[in-house]
Amino acid sequence: MGNSVSRSRGLFSRALAHIPGGVNSPVRAWRAVGQEPLFISRAAGAYVFDADGNRFIDYVGSYGPAILGHANPGVAVAVAEQAEKGFSYGAPTEEEVCLAEELSGAISCAEKVRLVSSGTEAAMTALRIARAATGRRKVLKFDGCYHGHSDALLARAGSGAMTFGLPDSAGVPPELAASTLVAPYNRLDAVERCLNANQGDVAAIIVEPLAANMGVVKPQPGFLAGLRDLADEFGALLICDEVISGFRLRYGAISDFWGVGPDLILLGKIIGGGMPIGAVAGRAELMDLLAPSGPVYQAGTLSGNPVCVRAGLATLAALREPGVYERLEELGAQLEAGFREALAQSGVAGCINRAGSLLTFFLGVSEVNDAGAARQADTSMFSRVFSAMLDAGVYLPPSQFEALFISLAHSEADLAHTVEALSAALRVAGRR
Ligand SMILES: *Cc1c(COP(=O)(O)O)cnc(C)c1O
């Protein structure tokens, strides 16, 4: 690559000695694009700076939280103020009440809210509530949807919609994986067949109402409403995982905007403003199943951590400013239009899926509505494009199957530079 990366190389070899794979979360190792990762030393606004001092326009955005851009001054002040007052008490605080009230006011099903420290925990807790509420064991999820790394939710489809899920990870007991049913996204017929074959056993359907972990994939008209109907018909709960989509496309939940009405909702990422957080929220009668009001045990030493909560409150306050989501839509539309033009001019086959400030360009496929189609994408061409973009100062998510995250700190000039870089990258990558 063009930039000097000697410090990153050195740090990575040190990391490999004492951290498995050199990273604390697998995607950061850049294996999907066949490269060694850059180590980031700081970030500001739309930019990240690596250990060698190279600057990149960042489209990772910490995988979602950085909607305001990095190191937003208002959030930084809130964090510093709270830090002076102590980092964690193991006791309730006023700030937690404020965040619960804020989430409850913004999201229709969120009568009550339990804060946790990650999206993974939120999903695991929601599933436990659903199993307790229904007395049932199985859960139906969708191929390509990610709900964190808890045992029960790491399964995805094998060969077909109705097959039992195979564990995506070693160390997940097969009995547990077998209680996770997997259907293709956007296929109500498969969901219905699956529910029919498992009558009386399915505690919950869990879905990303806007899928963003197989690349961005939108629900087709009627899909989410159909899930709501099927859940009711078969006596299962509907859990909407809005860890990415919550507060990303509007102030609140995208499931509300689309009129879905889930029983439980999962939040994370943006609501912590870049600090570790997650939340499960929902109808009071379900949420009150949680200890200490009910029999479902759930706890956390750092749950509702005041520094995280202050970061979240400050982020949400900034998102309540008028015009914020219109601006994100404008930026998303600009990037999409530029990318479309770049694809057309290069003659490389591809398609672009976008919702607001979330975007994926899939290379080598003409349409992507589910994980099966996404898997047809040309990942080796994506790797070449990724490298060329990096050389041009643009930091894309290091996988074809991640969304690009645009923030309020991205400027038109940043996006224009990004489009130019993609045009050049596609000209080279497409030639092979
Ligand atoms: C990131 C993510 C999670 C997991 O959140 P963590 O905080 O990484 O545990 C769950 N669901 C979705 C949709 C996510 O994007």
Image: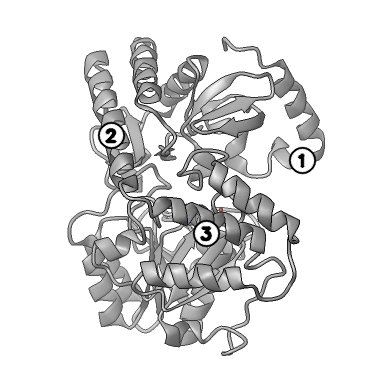
Residue 5 placement: quadrant:
top right
Checking the image for residue 410, the label placed there is: none
Cα separation between marks 2 and 1? 36 Å
Mark 3: amino acid:
Leu
> Does 309 appear above or below 339?
below
Cα separation between marks 3 and 1? 33 Å
Mark 1: amino acid:
Ile
The quadrant of the picture occupied by the N terminus is top right
Q: Tell me what residue is drawn at x 75 percent, y 69 percent.
A: 89
Checking the image for residue 19, the label placed there is: 1
Q: Quick one: label 1, few (<14), some, or many (20+) residues within 10 Å? A: few
Mark 2: amino acid:
Ile
Q: Tell me what residue is drawn at x 31 percent, y 34 percent.
A: 331
**In the rendered image, which residue does mark 2 sit on?**
352
Question: Residue 257: percent from the left, percent from the top?
Answer: 26, 61
Residue 142 in sight: yes
Give the mark nearest the N terminus, 3 or 1.
1
Helix, strand or loop at mark 2? strand
> Which of these two is toward me, 360 or 103?
103
**In the rendered image, which residue does mark 3 sit on?**
313
